[in-house]
Image: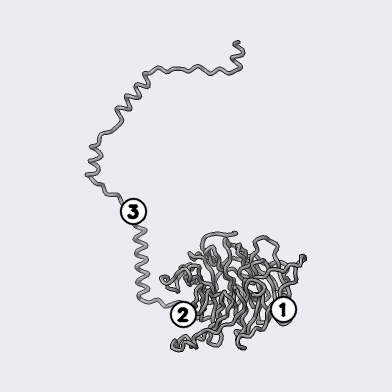
Amino acid sequence: MKWTTANIKHANYTTKHELFVGTHTGSFKHLLPAADKNPYAQSNLSDLTTLDKESRVTSLGFGNEAQTEILLGRAKNSAELHSLGRSGGITTRSINFTAAPIVGLARYNNNLIAGIANGQIQSVSLEAEQDAEDEESSKPVVINSGDHMDHLRQCQAAPHIVATGGKARQNNLKVYDLSADGKQIFTSKNLPNDYLQLEVPVWDSDIGFVDGPNVLATCSRHGYVRLYDTRKQRRPVTHFSSEEHGMSFAALVAHGNYIYTGTTMGALKAFDTRRMKTHVHTYKGFTGGISDLHLDETGRFLSSASLDRYVRVHEAESTVLLYQCYVKSKATKVLIRELSAEQQQPRQQTNDDAEEEDEELNSQKHNKNNKRKPQATPLDAEYEDMFDQMPTVGDSDGEEASERQAMAPVKRKAPKQTLKTKKKKQ
């Protein structure tokens, strides 16, 4: 099956996962594919009444290794810090910056770092945000990386390392060390000029760390995927360049020796860093551009957000579509994580829950009985008498007209003579 518009859950998908989805309208949703009753149920984690045109979710990521904090950035100059409780409760905190939109978020030493589309990296102390009286301490620390930024990514293995990338040569891949006051420790260099001695266009739309702070991968809207090693050289050590029309990469995530990329035309492909000449896997089922990718901790399950309003989970190795759910809005960001041990335990049934289940069963039985016994429509005597007293119109006139047509003689028309018959008569 190449693609379908129905909600799907594969029978072999038994891993207890939960999904967090950010949409184009600004809503922040929670999905629970592990639910037995309804694995497609959705709950909104944000207040829908406060959303506007600038509330689009532009960044989404975990704030710590335990994955109990979610950093959410929007198209306006505000970010949200969501703390996930053990029992499933969520507390939200808002942090303001001086520019927008936010294209990436990271947390380091109780500081929230945001990448802005104008090329700035702003750092705000979370402790200063709580003390609103001191205005000078609440102002963000700004680092200029260029005049345009498409994405900011934090290294999970080394949280003090962040990388940025954007459009044009001056906004190519750059790596910063937050422990050294935001010092730039690496900047990439473009490939040599082509055979016409023209500069190769650069546009790093997304960045990913390949199991460490030294090896990075970038993808581009110009149709290339590059692999950098900061210990060897500034230019890419290997790369893939697409000659197909429309191969514009928009999202990237890396794990182990594999790089997963999504295009604006709805193609999801996997590359092996040991041979980048061509892709090794292709994932099907998409009918819209892919906006974000995220892997779970094991690297086995690949979640994707697409502009066709669907969220999908594929098995990374076998490329099988395990889960697909319609989220009613264009999905821009997605996160996947495994449920905690407390959330996986079945909840004990209380008396209220038993009463609710009994009421549901009774209502279902009542509805079935009503469907089996169709109710007769009530008759209105006055309405029926009114129709009985109405004279029938057109019966006598129709009989007279039919008699006249029968009595009238039928005139026969002479057959038309052709040119051949006329010549023979002459």
Instruction: Report how far apart the C-alphas of labels 3 and 1 lie in the structure.
Output: 78 Å
Percent position of residue 67, x then y: 53, 80
Q: Residue furthest right?
A: 195
In primary-sequence order, the first of circles 3 and 1 is 1
In the rendered image, which residue does mark 1 sit on? Answer: 234
Name the residue carrying label 3: 373
Bin the neighbour count of mark 1 within 10 Å (Cα to Cα): few under 14, some 14-19, many 20 and up.
Answer: some
Residue toward you, 351 or 394: 394
Residue 151 in view of the camera: yes
Q: Amino acid at mark 3?
A: Lys
Residue occupying the far top of the picture: 426
Measured as percent of width and height from the top left, residue 374 is found at: 33, 52
Q: Position of residue 359 (x, y in %)?
A: 34, 67
Left or right of 194? Residue 378 is: left
**Residue at mark 2:** 94
Compare residues 103 and 70 and report the one nearer the observer.
103
Amino acid marked by disc 2: Ser
Q: Residue at x 63, y 75 (%)?
A: 165
Kindly report the distance in space between the C-alpha atoms of the residues bearing marks 1 and 2. 38 Å
- What is the C-alpha distance between the residues marked 3 and 2? 56 Å
| Residue at figure coordinates x 47%, y 85% from the top left | 129
Identify the element where label 2 is drawn: strand
Q: Quadrant of the N terminus?
A: bottom right
* Amino acid on which disc 1 is placed: Arg
In the figure, residue 333 lies in which quadrant?
bottom right
Q: Is residue 49 left or right of residue 190?
A: left
Q: Earlier in the sequence, mark 1 or mark 2?
A: 2
Circles 3 and 1 in contact, beta carbons < 8 Å:
no
Q: Nearer the viewer, mark 3 or mark 1?
A: 1
Which label's residue is closer to the chain start, 3 or 2?
2
Q: Secondary structure at mark 3?
A: loop
